[in-house]
């Protein structure tokens, strides 16, 4: 099983599926949707088999494959996965079929091509899997840039109001960030011995000139900070998330943005350990500002999809401080946060999309008292909101707790300030729920026929896996943390950081 080419097949399968679906005639929309969904389910099944075959206590990188690509540059098609990449790959494989089911009736067959939309979703899945599976820096960069294309067309061609503006802004921000990364990739190839191999570059990192390493680190970091996005590179996300179809927005904030935080963990920290330690104070400050600033802006939003987008920026602040706290607890919490945020915010976006599809509007003022007509959907919105604010018993609580306690051991001030974000999260979530589903029933809502139809069987199938996982991982996160922990510990060793010794142990006393 170890020799089976999981990663290359997982990467290629969606691409082949995208080509098949794209050639289905426009008039056969149902066939296109069925084929695309079936293809994504096959990818999910293969990813589950890979998860089972992965040995948590085994080698750091497993399922390694390497094929010749550009001999002149010594660039290769090299794939490998550690625990950090593995959990993201499975998250992608889970969310894509759910997004397809959620999008089943979202595309107007008379105005837009259904096969094109579902082919773009499969093409996006291919690039997302590739970017997390790559173990060659140049291959990673290629997937990093190509990933923009399908999402650009999804937003620009199938989005809502101001979709063209949002798509161009998303593309330009990411492209500019990618140019910084391209310069850093070229520089890394020059100083790293003319290789793009991750392992070789990590081994050679100790020989890098300090000043050069810091500049190269900054090139990668800017690209990843834009992609995440971290404050102050965040302004594209509310526009893109607000304009994109809600199911596609679930992928945008649930997976695509994680490429930024994953890139920092996979490339910035191991290849530039000294630069990572040098830049950590600034990164912690940016993370804390992002938590508070985005939460305050979320409270003032009047568009549901933009509100959810701003909450994601706040959550990425937590992930950022967890990464740069340089403790195993905080690092594991950050990676777990990446997974749990994908589940919780994915669910929140999908449920918001169900409300928007029924009402024909995403403005909070166009709702009010909707829970009286669709009580189950209202309950799901409430649950998704509580999971997003990390209520104990839901999966995000575990990751947020690990981030804060791990950060507190080394950076008490940042951890205390970041805790204020929890209070603000309660404010914007409860405000959203109250204004949309509670209170006096809005007459316009009552007069909308679609608002009298509660959750359908298809929608139950969409939300059920996410609800179950959020509850299961809220009470029993061990299956995921066992996979994540070894990779995080290895990353901390790359950075040259060890966990602080508890005071009682340091003083020669062990609590009994």
Image (tube, rainbow, N blue to C red):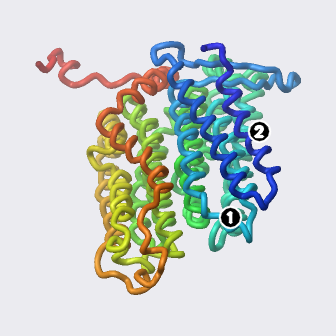
Say which of 51 and 338 sits in front.
51
Q: Secondary structure at mark 2?
A: helix
The label shown at residue 16 is 2
| x, y percent for residue 101 | 57, 52
The label shown at residue 158 is 1
The image quarter containing residue 321 is: top left
| x, y percent for residue 243 | 61, 66
> What residue lies at 67% left-to-right and 40% top-to-bottom?
39
Residue 8 horizontal side relative to residue 503, left or right: right
> What residue lies at 71% left-to-right and 66% top-to-bottom?
109
Q: Secondary structure at mark 1?
A: helix
Q: Specify whether residue 306 is in view.
A: yes
Q: Nearer the viewer, mark 2 or mark 1?
A: 2
| x, y percent for residue 195 | 76, 22
Label 2 neighbour load within 10 Å: few <14, some 14-19, many 20+? some
Label 1 neighbour load within 10 Å: few <14, some 14-19, many 20+? many
> Which residue is farthest right?
72
- Tally the marks: 2
The image quarter containing residue 436 is: bottom left
In the image, residue 153 sits, relative to residue 208, either above or below, namely below
């Amino acid at each position: 099983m170890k020799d089976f080419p999981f990663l290359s097949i997982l990467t290629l399968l969606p691409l082949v599926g995208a080509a098949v679906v794209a050639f289905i005639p426009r008039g056969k929309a149902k066939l296109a949707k069925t084929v695309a969904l079936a293809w994504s389910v096959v990818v999910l099944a293969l990813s589950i088999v890979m998860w089972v075959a992965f040995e948590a206590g085994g080698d750091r990188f497993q399922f390694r494959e390497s094929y010749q690509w550009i001999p002149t540059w010594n660039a290769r098609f090299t794939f490998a996965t550690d625990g950090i990449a593995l959990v993201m790959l499975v998250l992608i494989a889970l969310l894509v079929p759910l997004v397809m089911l959620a999008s089943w009736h979202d595309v107007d067959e008379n105005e837009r091509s259904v096969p094109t939309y579902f082919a773009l979703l499969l093409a996006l899945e291919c690039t997302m899997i590739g970017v997390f599976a790559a173990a060659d820096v140049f291959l990673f960069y290629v997937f990093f840039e190509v990933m923009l294309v399908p999402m650009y067309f999804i937003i620009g061609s199938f989005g809502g109001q101001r979709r063209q503006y949002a798509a161009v802004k998303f593309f330009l921000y990411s492209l500019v960030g990618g140019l910084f990364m391209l310069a850093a990739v070229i520089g890394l190839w020059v100083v790293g011995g003319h290789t793009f191999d991750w392992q070789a570059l990590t081994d050679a990192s100790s020989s890098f000139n300090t000043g050069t390493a810091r500049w190269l680190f900054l090139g990668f970091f800017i690209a990843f900070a834009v992609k995440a996005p971290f404050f102050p590179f965040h302004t594209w996300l509310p526009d893109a998330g607000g304009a994109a179809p809600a199911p596609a927005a679930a992928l945008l904030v649930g997976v695509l943005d994680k490429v930024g935080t994953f890139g920092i963990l996979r490339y910035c920290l191991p290849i530039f350990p000294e630069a990572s330690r040098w830049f950590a104070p600034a990164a912690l400050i940016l993370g804390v500002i992002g938590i508070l600033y985005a939460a305050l802006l979320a409270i003032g939003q009047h568009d549901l999809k933009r509100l959810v987008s701003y909450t994601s920026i706040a959550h990425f602040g937590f992930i950022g401080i967890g990464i740069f706290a340089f403790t195993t607890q905080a690092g594991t919490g950050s990676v777990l946060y990446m997974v749990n945020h994908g589940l919780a915010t994915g669910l929140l976006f999908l449920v918001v999309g169900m409300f928007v599809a029924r009402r024909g509007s995403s403005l909070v003022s166009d709702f009010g008292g909707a829970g009286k007509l669709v009580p189950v959907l209202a309950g799901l919105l409430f649950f998704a909101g509580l999971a997003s604010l990390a209520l104990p018993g839901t999966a995000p609580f575990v990751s947020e707790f690990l981030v804060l306690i791990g950060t507190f051991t080394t950076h008490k001030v940042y951890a205390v300030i970041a805790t204020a974000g929890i209070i603000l999260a309660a404010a914007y979530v409860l405000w959203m729920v109250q204004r949309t589903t509670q209170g006096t029933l809005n007459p316009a809502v009552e007069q909308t026929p679609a608002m009298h139809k509660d959750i359908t069987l298809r929608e139950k199938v969409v939300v059920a896996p996410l609800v179950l996982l959020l509850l299961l991982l809220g009470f029993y996160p061990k299956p995921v943390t066992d996979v994540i922990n070894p990779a995080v510990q290895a990353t901390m060793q790359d950075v040259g950081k060890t966990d602080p010794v508890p005071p009682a142990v340091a003083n020669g006393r062990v609590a009994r």
